[in-house]
Image (tube, grey):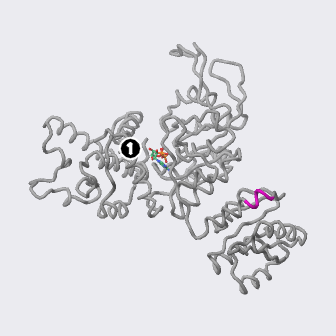
Amino acid sequence: MKKKILIVDDEISIGLLLSKFLAKKGFEVSNVTSGKKVLQALEKERFDLVLCDYRLGDTDGKEILIYIKENHPNTGVIIITGYSDIKLAVELIKLGAYDYIVKPLYPDEILNTINKALEAQGVLKSPKDFEDTGCHSISNVQNSPAYINGESAASVLLLKQIQLIAPTGYTVILTGKSGTGKECVAKTIHLNSSRSEQPFIAMDCGSLTKDLAASEFFGHEKGAFTGATFTKIGHFEQANGGTLFLDEIGNLSYEIQATLLRAVQERKIKRIGSTKEIDLDMRLIVATNENLQEAIQKGTFREDLYHRFNEFSIHVPALKDRDNDILIFAEHFLATVNQELNKKIKGFSDEVKKCLLAYSWPGNVRELKNVIRRIALLTDGDWIEPHVLPLEFGMIDYRNKPNDKKVTLLPTASNQDKSINLRHAAKEAEYNTILEVLKAVNFNKTKAAKILNIDRKTLYNKIKFIDAGEGI
Ligand SMILES: Nc1ncnc2c1ncn2[C@@H]1O[C@H](COP(=O)(O)OP(=O)(O)OP(=O)(O)O)[C@@H](O)[C@H]1O
């Protein structure tokens, strides 16, 4: 059956041109020239897709989009805009538009977008579509795990925003709780930009001290200060040509922010101890799990720097807001662990699935990844059963096998060497303490390190250690 498309454009010639082209491509096409006529047309018949010009005499594309999404949710909408306005485009996509096309119109682009919109209709996108739609997975980055998207509305929106912003050179602020995947998103944006062949350099600003900051950002010449025994290339210079990802910018001291602002504004740096200016040509992506607006109000974050960064912002949703994506991520991590540990675990029992879905995941995707690594390691059979779930799942009962007298942290360790068991128990206790503290401080690693009385780097290593599946 032919797919029905309604073209809405008050420029009659453009509408006619488009309808001729689409009719030739096998679509059944109708044309209208005003908002009022759209309503009448939609009352009369069902359309698969509405291709709507943003600016119309009696209304605009946004109004029409809202009307269609409320009254004909199964009809896809593509908006045509006269100028490239990313913010407007994102707003329209958030409101439910499948995509937007910027004039001048190119037949191939229109056809491609229409076909994709029709394919996607009624079906939420699967993670694989990320690659199908021309975005690369990040699996080709050394030491980077593949980027997994989900099917929830929040994940579909996230993917759209990544696809939209990646090819522009915009500086992006990524907000979201710790472990939601901000760095993963930053890498994906980089890999889908024209800089993908150039370096992606990630820098954790949370651990920067005042003394180290300038040298870490801009590098130094040999002999520039006591202890500068070698020339050091800073992160800005390393990222030149590519993308610099600054993580945890909310933790930067006010003084360091001033240094950073100069470099970002002027796009030039000097290594410490050098007079030579180095021109910068790179994209900046920054991330924070702090509320920067609040920090600005409190006077701890510079408003001017914030505006420099905020050419575009993307919120990376918490895992609990990604519905059944939890299971998509879980299956993916299980497949990876199976490979790493040479196991053949088939999947999760229904009970475990329920627990995974019911848990609140304060540590987000990172926590999920760790949990899957741990429970896969503890599983001997084909299926992951509830008794291997960590204590925070409130599954203590499950952890007691029928003949056990006490709750054991590692049920499978009963037949293991006692010393190994103790070591494991110590690691488990350490893991749980770190996790508890992290949760208590909303996963702010700087604060957690202070409470745990270890430096941030040690904490980072321990988290990595856990991340790497060794923290059992
Ligand atoms: N979409 C994703 N696909 C695959 N793995 C992911 C995804 N999102 C997150 N992860 C994994 O979860 C872990 C945490 O992700 P990441 O470091 O990107 O989070 P973050 O938000 O930058 O955390 P933080 O704020 O603490 O730095 C990593 O091991 C990462 O590989």
Q: Is 309 on the left or on the right of 453, as rendered?
A: right
For this view, does 390 lie left or right of residue 56?
A: left
* Res 56 → quadrant: bottom right
The secondary structure making up most of the magenta span is helix
How many residues crowd mark 1 within 10 Å: few (<14), some (14–19), many (20+)? many
Point out the image quarter for the C terminus.
top left
| Residue 109 is covered by the magenta coloring | yes
Q: Position of residue 264 (x, y in %)?
A: 68, 37
Q: Is residue 22 above or below residue 344?
A: below
Residue 189 lies in the magenta-colored region: no
- Give whichever of 342, 307 is nearer the camera: 342
User: Where residue 171 appears, x then y in whole percent?
Assistant: 66, 45
For disc 1, does the CB lie below 8 Å from ligand 1?
A: no
Task: Identify whether 300 is placed above or below 282.
Answer: below
Considering the numbered disc 1 on the image, is that residue within a helix, a strand or a loop? helix
Seen as rendered, the residue at the extreme right is 13
Q: Residue at x 13, y 43 (%)?
A: 415
Q: Residue at x 41, y 43 (%)?
A: 447
Q: Amino acid at mark 1?
A: Ala
Near-viewer residue (19 or 401): 19
Considering only vertical position in the picture, is 106 above or below 215?
below
Q: Quadrant of the N terminus?
A: bottom right
Q: Nearer the viewer, residue 162 or 20?
A: 20
Q: Position of residue 290 (x, y in %)?
A: 51, 50
Residue 54, image quadrant: bottom right
Residue 277 location, x and y as percent? 72, 23
Residue under the point 35% across and 45% down:
338
Horizontal side, residue 193 vs residue 127: left or right: right
Q: Which residues are magenta?
A: 107-111
Task: Check disc 1 and report the residue beneath it.
Answer: 448
